[in-house]
């Protein structure tokens, strides 16, 4: 039942965001995290929360066009899920900011 419920929840998420291509292996790993005899809506919400905390490289295929980094003046249409791995302050490209602030 849980596996069917998780599959239905994944279908619900991908119907909402068609460019989202969840990896089947990741979906099957989430079955143990979907609690109880939930409805598809509740399971989809739980799966979305798990997806939000996941490393996107493990959870889904990329939704952006291939070789995007080699194209210039390209407009990307539609909805896409992105994960920020690193940021760079382009106003200070050499990194002369000093030590990082304490948390």
Image (spheres, helix red, strand yellow):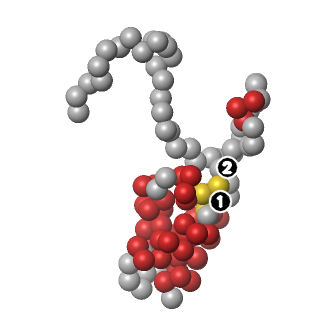
Q: CA distance from mark 2 to mark 1?
A: 7 Å
Q: Number of callouts in the render?
A: 2
Dot 2 falls on a residue whose secondary structure is loop
Asked whether residue 32 appears in the rendered view, the answer is yes
Looking at the image, residue 100 lies above or below residue 82: above
Please tell me how crowded label 2 is: few (under 14), some (14-19), or many (20+) other residues with Cα within 10 Å.
some
Q: Position of residue 67 (x, y in %)?
A: 75, 37
Dot 1 falls on a residue whose secondary structure is strand
N-terminal of the pair, mark 2 or mark 1, is 1
Q: Which mark is residue 1?
A: none
Q: Position of residue 63 (x, y in %)?
A: 67, 49
Looking at the image, residue 74 lies above or below residue 80: above
Q: Nearer the viewer, residue 51 or 98?
A: 98
Q: Which residue is mark 1?
A: 21
Q: Nearer the viewer, residue 17 or 88?
A: 88
Q: Residue at x 50, y 39 (%)?
A: 84
Q: Residue at x 43, y 81 (%)?
A: 38
Looking at the image, residue 28 lies above or below residue 71: below
Image quarter where the C terminus lies is: top left
Horizontally, residue 14 falls left or right of residue 72, namely left
Please tell me how crowded label 1 is: few (under 14), some (14-19), or many (20+) other residues with Cα within 10 Å.
some
Horizontally, residue 8 falls left or right of residue 64, namely left
Looking at the image, residue 19 lies above or below residue 24: above
Q: Which residue is mark 2?
A: 63
Question: Do the residues under discs 2 and 1 have CB atoms within 8 angstroms?
Answer: yes
């Amino acid at each position: 039942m849980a596996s069917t419920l998780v599959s239905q929840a994944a279908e619900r998420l991908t119907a909402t965001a068609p460019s989202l291509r969840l990896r089947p292996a990741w979906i099957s790993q989430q079955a143990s995290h979907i609690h109880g005899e939930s409805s598809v809506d509740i399971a989809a919400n739980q799966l979305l929360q798990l997806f939000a905390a996941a490393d996107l490289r493990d959870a889904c295929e990329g939704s952006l066009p291939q070789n995007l980094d080699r194209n210039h003046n390209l407009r990307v249409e539609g909805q896409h899920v992105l994960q920020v791995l690193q940021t760079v302050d382009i106003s200070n490209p050499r990194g002369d900011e000093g030590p990082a602030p304490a948390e």
